Image (cartoon, rainbow, N blue to C red):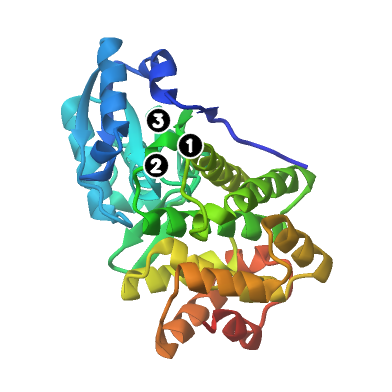
């Protein structure tokens, strides 16, 4: 077994305020990386600014992170941080701002390098980083992964470097005001992380312990996700923690085929990431070893892959043309690193079956 998750993690209401001194201890001036609206609306940005001010720490805000941030946005954040003299970075939001914050923290530490360094093998050193998640999906606050859009390649690509946050401050209350569509899509992403870590050649007892606890928490939130119950504080906390467990799991194993298939759909068809990756989960699991597949599905509350497929289609329907699906499948077949962690042998015929929505 092996396990590595260097982020110090806290999950509680009022998390940012409660741990403001640890946040402030990361440096003397922060670059806050976030989006234009949601972190202001849910109060997370205000909480972070108040925490820093109470500790006498200066900050500058970069709030131009778009959904699925691109290399150009990362470099703009890097330039803003260098100009301000920032010595640590705080990412606030969903996976997009936190991933952008990771990449910016890396590039500020390598000021003489161009954007190409993101995708080159080299020194992983980066500015200290804190993450404040405000969605219940990516788990980016506890992973070293940063997925950034490459317009030159017309897809999303993980950077080559591992940049783990030093501090993860998780507060479920931030999603209570989020649109239902955002909660559903990001929750499906968290479920996908758990499934892809569980059905993975690199899975071991330690990662599976995390996977099955995450699936248990996710299952308890099914009534809220399905619309039978309102989202309350306890369910919000469980959804956020299921997302954290998903992040911790993929930090050990990585994601597999569904995530790789999803990136073209998000870039070309503008399908939200959670919906795009969720669309392939049932077919991916169908071909896994039966005992492994059934254990994962049962833990999440599904008697079989068909019931999983039915729920995801009802919550986050996806429509993609056959040409796009075929091109996506062909691109994944050319990625040996993704094929290597799939727990069963893949050929072109089977990949096309997984990719069929």
The residue wearing badge 1 is 233
Q: CA distance from mark 3 to mark 2?
A: 25 Å
Residue, far left:
83
Nearest the viewer among 88 and 39 is 39
**In the rendered structure, are the residues bearing label 3 and label 2 in contact, judged by CB atoms less than 8 Å apart?**
no
Q: Quadrant of residue 339?
A: bottom right
**Residue 327 rendering spot, x and y as whole percentages:** 44, 83
* N-term mark: 1 or 3: 3
Q: Quadrant of residue 38?
A: top left
**In the rendered structure, are the residues bearing label 1 and label 3 in contact, judged by CB atoms less than 8 Å apart?**
no
Q: 190 left or right of 97?
A: right
Residue beneath the point at 63% across and 47% down? 249
Secondary element at tag 3? strand
Mark seen at residue 310: none
Residue beneath the point at 66% across and 83% down? 347
Mark seen at residue 129: 3
**In the rendered structure, are the residues bearing label 1 and label 2 in contact, judged by CB atoms less than 8 Å apart?**
yes
């Amino acid at each position: 077994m092996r396990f590595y998750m260097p982020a110090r993690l806290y999950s509680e209401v009022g998390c940012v305020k409660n741990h403001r001194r640890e946040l402030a201890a990361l440096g003397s001036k922060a670059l806050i990386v976030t989006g234009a609206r949601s972190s202001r609306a849910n109060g997370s940005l205000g909480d972070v600014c108040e925490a820093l001010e109470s500790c006498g720490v200066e900050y500058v805000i970069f709030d131009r992170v778009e959904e699925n941030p691109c290399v150009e946005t990362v470099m703009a954040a890097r330039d803003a941080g260098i100009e301000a003299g920032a010595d640590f970075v705080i990412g606030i939001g969903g996976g997009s701002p936190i991933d952008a914050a990771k990449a910016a923290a890396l590039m500020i530490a390598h000021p003489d390098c161009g954007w190409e360094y993101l995708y080159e093998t080299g020194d992983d050193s980066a500015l200290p980083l804190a993450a404040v998640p405000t969605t219940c999906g990516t788990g980016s606050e506890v992973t070293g992964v940063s997925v950034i859009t490459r317009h030159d390649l017309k897809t999303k690509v993980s950077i080559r470097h591992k940049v783990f946050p030093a501090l993860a401050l998780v507060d479920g209350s931030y999603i209570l005001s989020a649109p239902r569509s955002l909660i559903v899509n990001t929750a499906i992403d968290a479920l996908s992380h758990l499934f892809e870590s569980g059905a993975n050649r690199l899975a071991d007892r330690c990662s599976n312990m995390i996977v099955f606890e995450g699936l248990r928490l996710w299952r308890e939130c099914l009534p809220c996700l399905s619309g039978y119950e309102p989202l309350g504080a306890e369910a919000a906390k469980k959804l956020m923690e299921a997302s954290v467990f998903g992040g911790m799991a993929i930090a050990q194993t990585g994601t597999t085929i569904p995530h790789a298939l999803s990136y073209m759909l998000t870039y070309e068809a503008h399908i939200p990431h959670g919906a795009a990756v969720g669309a392939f989960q049932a077919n991916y699991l169908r071909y896994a070893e039966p005992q492994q597949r059934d254990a994962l599905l049962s833990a999440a509350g599904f008697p079989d892959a068909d019931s999983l497929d039915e729920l995801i289609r009802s919550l986050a329907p996806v429509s993609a043309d056959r040409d796009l699906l075929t091109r996506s499948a062909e691109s994944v077949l050319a990625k040996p690193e993704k094929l290597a962690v799939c727990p069963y042998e893949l050929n072109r015929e089977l990949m096309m079956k997984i990719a069929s929505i």
